[in-house]
Every structure is written in C-alpha cells, then in structure tokens.
Image (tube, rainbow, N blue to C red):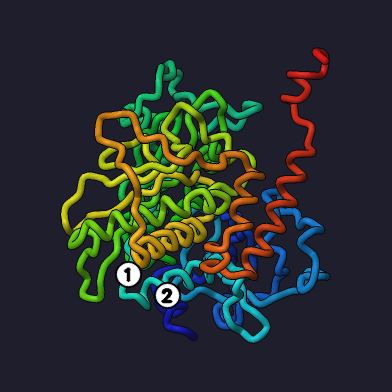
Amino acid sequence: MSDEIKNYLANHPAPQSIDVLITDANGILRGKQFPGDQLESLCKKGANLPISLMFGDVRGSTPSALLVPPLVGDPDINYKMIEGSLRPVPWTKVPTAQLFLRATDKDGSNLASDPLTVLENVIKRLNDDGMFPTIALEGEFYLLDPSKSPPEPLQPKNGWPSFEGPQVYALEPLRDVQGFLNGVKKVAKAQSIPLTSILCEYGDSQFEMNLDHSSQVTTHARDFMLLKHAIKNIAEANGQLASFMALPLSSEGGSGCHIHVSLQDKAGNNIFGKDEGKLLDAIGGLMETMSDSLAACAPYANSYKRYRKEGWSPNSCNWGRNHRLVSLRIPISGEKDKRVEHRIAGADVNPYLLCAAVLAGIHHGVKNRIDPGPESMEGQEPEQGIELPTRWREALKAFSRSKFFTDYFGEEFMEIYCRAKFAEEENFHMEVSDRDHGWCLRTV
C-alpha cells in the first residue's frame, strides 16, 4: 500500500466509492465510478478507458473525423494516477474518494497529445533556460436558477428584491448565497485547494474565485479544475446551477479566466522584478503569439460571444500598467511579485492549455527579446493593437497553421486537437437554433 493511500485512510473513512477524473482537451472532467475496494488497484495500475475521452466534443460525442489512424476503432489506453491527487469528496452521502488520471501511451510514457503533457513540455523548456514560472489563476462563474428555462440569475431566497446593476465587489450579494460559499470553503479546505477569496463580479449573480499563487504549475491548474468541480456540485446541492460558460446570459458580462505569471531564477529571485526589460520581452512574446493562441484559450462556439466591442473582455493585442481594458496588464506590484496578467481566456478554458499557451509565449519573448510595442497608458483609452480572430473558425485556422504552437505543443497534439475542434465547429454551424427561428421563420 502506498504512502498516499495510508495517509488518506489515516485521515478519512475507507471509501465506499471512488470517482476517477480525467481532464479532457476541452477542460471538461470525464471519468468513472469504481467500488471503494479498488482504491489500491486504481492507484497502482490506473484504468483502461477509451482514448476518445480525451478528444470528444463538448457534448461528449466523438466526431468521425477524429477516428482515423491511429485512433480507428477508438482503442483503450491506460490512464494512470497522478500522484498527490487522491482527495475526499465531502458532498457525497457515502464516503467517497476521488483521484485524477492521465493518459499514457503503449510504452507507458505520458501521452504526447494529453494537454497535461503539453504543459509539462513547455515548462521543461523554460526550466532548461533557467526560468521557473509561478502562476495564479482567477475564474468567474454565474449562479443561476435552474428552474427557469433558459436559466436566469439567482434571486435572493428570502423574497427580497434583487439588486439593480452589477454591484461589483458588494458584500450583500455574497450574504444572499452564504450557504453556498460556506460549502465551497469547506470543500476547499478538505481537498487542500488553495482558495484565497470569492468576490461579487460584474454580472448579476456573477462571482469570481481566486487561487493562491504557486510554482507548482501543473498542480495549480489541476486545483483550478478541482475548484470548478466543487463549485458546481455544491451549487447543485443548494438547488442552484453554477456555470463557467464564457457568456451564459446575453444581457450580462462574460466570465473570464485570468492568469498571473512571474518567472523566478534558480535562486528563487523574481526575474521580472530584477530586470523589467525581461518582463517587457515576455509581454512582447505574448503579443506576438496571442492571435495564434486564441483557439487554445477559447474552446467553444460560446467562448467567442464573450469578445465584445464594449466591455471588460479584450479583443485586441495590447498591454499596459494598472489598466483593466488591455489584454496584458502589469498590476501594481513590487520587485518580489512583479508579474503580467493575461486577460484573454474565458472561464470555460482548459487550464493546462491556457498555462501552456501563456508560458510558451513568455518563453519565446524572453529568449528572443521581443518588443511589445506601445504601452496603453494608465487612465487613457487603450492602444488599438492587432485585432484578435474572435470568430471560432478564424481562430482555429490561425492555431492550426501556427508553426510556433506546432513547435511548442507538438505535431501529435495539434493534429488531433484541431481535427476534433474543426469537426465540432462544423457541427455547431449546421445547427438550427431558436435564434434562426426568431429572426427568420416568419420574416423571410
């Protein structure tokens, strides 16, 4: 029996059920439930499951365009346990454990097309050049009333009138959902998720969750997935619907995922704090690769509805200090915490791919001394940089043709991911929606 299992059983009842979780390329958790007596076997041997779990579309469907050699017949592969991922599941009625699995190849090595492997390979390139990233993720979400169709913002339970306006950073909306918040904090503590705060965001019943900064990048990205999973389950237990859609309500603001990044040297010193020129180089790299990266930061059709001409979601490449209308922001900070905040991705993003795309851009910028161009000055209208490809097919074309991301992410990942996403985009485009009927059924 491994030390991880021994430590788990010393602090928690023996599980009656085990949830195995796999983060697919979309950033959706897939998995399977096993009996509790299989804990040791799962930790040691993992589970054999279809390879298509990694690359299905948002509906869990496997596009036929994906099932070409070497994926014909949708073969099983071995998904092995990620060490350190064994956690209790506090919201279940019987003792339940959960653990994360990752995809492996026939020879037992990590599958090259798994987004976790993609991220690890990017981090290695940074480490090989004496750069060690520290990140912090922020994600926004809505609490909705699931009894309404389509869902509507959650109303106060006590019968009081709802607030007018976004009430950003207000405390009263937090008190309206205090039971939900208490549940999230309890789960975060039980699962060792480094949650620092939850605040009221800019939309009606929209909130933001913040994770503490960490130099363990892959673990931090997994914690982001864990927290999303917990929030959705705690909301359901409270009769609420938590959604991380990029734009669940056309009348409200979008939900983003911001990532703060700094680099340390081998001695633990902040490279950006010691030499701001390196920070500007990093921003230059992010600027140069941003258009090509959008398909990795915005995985669905709905993701692109967040990019509006007016609002807090940037739709062009620009940067500035202490400026929330730019895509790359340098927050107020000192030498030890000097960092860049990347503000492009939606809350629906796969955090492994977001981290990989951002860190690849930073590595490219620092290595090649990329000029970021003019700064958007504090208190002034932001510089109008190169517009991002804010339509799904255009973003996919840019990503699929990118020599830069083929180099950093690998040909195998790029081929499978882009094939799957182009198929999903085509299927969505062919759907006839209620908007087609509302705009055209009787009119034309």
| Relative image position of residue 265 (x, y in whole percent) | 25, 71
Give the distance between the C-alpha atoms of the residues marked 2 and 1, in whole angstroms.
Answer: 9 Å
Residue 44 position, x and y percent, is 56, 83
Q: Is residue 275 left or right of residue 44?
A: left
Query: On the image, which quarter does residue 56 sit in?
Result: bottom right
> Which residue position is annotated with label 2?
124
Mark 2 residue type: Lys
Binning the other alpha carbons within 10 Å of mark 2 as few (below 14), some (14 to 19) or many (20 upward) gives few
Left or right: 175 as drawn, with respect to 157 = left
| Left or right relative to 125: residue 51 | right
Residue named by callout 1: 132
Where does the C terminus fall, quadrant-wise?
Answer: top right
Height in image: 405 above or below 185?
below
Q: Is residue 164 above or below residue 61?
A: above
Residue at image location 28% in from the left, 47% down from the top: 330
Give the left or right position of residue 425, taking residue 163 as reference: right
Query: For the residue marked with disc 1, what is the amino acid?
Result: Phe
Residue at (42%, 75%) from the top-left corner? 124
Tag 1: Cα neighbours inside 10 Å, few (<14), some, or many (≥20)? Answer: many
Indicate the quadrant where residue 148 lies.
top right
441 or 34, nearer to the observer: 441
- Describe the element under mark 2 as helix, strand or loop: helix
Q: Position of residue 46 (x, y in %)?
A: 61, 77
**Nearer the observer, 178 or 417:** 417
Q: Secondary structure at mark 1?
A: strand
Res. 127 image quadrant: bottom left
At 36% across and 58% down in the image, what residue appears?
Answer: 370
Number of marks in picture: 2
Contact, CB < 8 Å: mark 2 with mark 1? Answer: no
